Image (cartoon, helix red, strand yellow):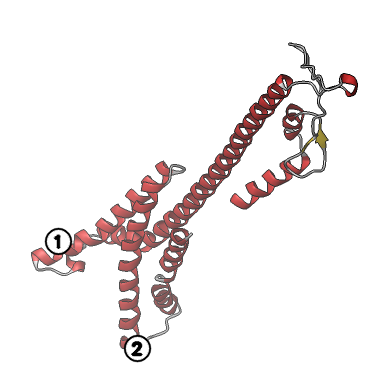
Amino acid sequence: MEAQNTGVWIAMAAILVQAPRLVLAVLAADHQAIAATWERALLILAGVGTALVLTGGNLYLAHAIARVRRWRAGLVVVWLVVLASTGGLVVPLIAAGIGGHTLPQVLDRDLLAWSWSLLAALAHEVTAAGCMLSAAALASTAAAAAHERSQSIAIDELLAQRDAGRRELAVLLERQSQGQRLPAPATAGGAGSEELAAPGSTAAAPLERVVCREGCGKSFSSLLGEMGHLRHCPARLERLSRSAAAGS
């Protein structure tokens, strides 16, 4: 969530740094003069904001590309465009400093001047679009991961219930086999003589009914019946839906 918020804030900053230049452009279009001090302050603010936005946007795009799988190709294209825009803005300044010239002297041709101006005007918008796409891709990746975790938890619960049912069934079968091997009770008219149950006799003993472990209130004559009921138990289905909704 913090990474997504960071992308949104960078996108908002990328739009806001154009505000000082928009103020100067609108005033110049209306032939309104502005003091040199104010113009200098607005231009410095726009320059500092541009540097921070382009640098932070490059880092955020690289971070998002390394983490997401959805829209990765599009984010790579946007990132390359932002890198090219940053390089196109910086290279003429470096060339001017090496040659001892000013930026207008390096951009003495109209094509170069218009190209540099276009990069300076659109680099912010491209960075803002890339940051918003990155934030959306990170949100989608986080939601998919949460859904996978909820499904994994539900599967683990089902496997645990299956193993518990198998253990209970084994215990029940062992008890039944032990009950068949017990001696039959002595008859009242035996006069002290005890008769053992004949081999292979199956003296039936009443079995306790198995109550649904999910607490829906139903009971069954055997553990197998209760395990078959769990597939359609309303209490269990409601619990799994709540856990899936809480995980997402």
**Comes first in the chain, label 1 or label 2:** 2
Image quadrant where residue 69 sits = top left
Q: Position of residue 55 (x, y in %)?
A: 31, 62
Residue at x 36%, y 47% (from the top left corner): 66
Residue 95: assigned label: 1
User: Which tag is nearer the camera, tag 1 or tag 2?
Assistant: 1
Mark 2 surroundings: few (<14), some (14-19) or many (≥20) residues within 10 A: few
Q: Position of residue 31 (x, y in %)?
A: 42, 81
Label 1 vs label 2: CA separation? Answer: 31 Å
Residue 180 lies, with reference to residue 155, above or below; the image says: above
> Are the residues tagged 1 and 2 within 8 Å (C-beta)?
no
Residue at x 52%, y 48% (from the top left corner): 140
Q: Position of residue 143 (x, y in %)?
A: 54, 49
Query: Foreground residue, 61 or 144?
Result: 144
Query: Foreground residue, 92 or 17?
Result: 17
| Residue 132 appears in view | yes
Q: Secondary structure at mark 1?
A: helix
The residue type indicated by label 2 comes to Ala
Query: Foreground residue, 70 or 26?
Result: 70
Left/right of residue 154 with respect to residue 87 in the rendered view = right
The residue to which callout 2 is attached is 35
The residue type indicated by label 1 comes to Ala
Q: Secondary structure at mark 2?
A: loop
Mark 1 surroundings: few (<14), some (14-19) or many (≥20) residues within 10 A: some
For the image shown, how many numbered marks are present on the structure?
2
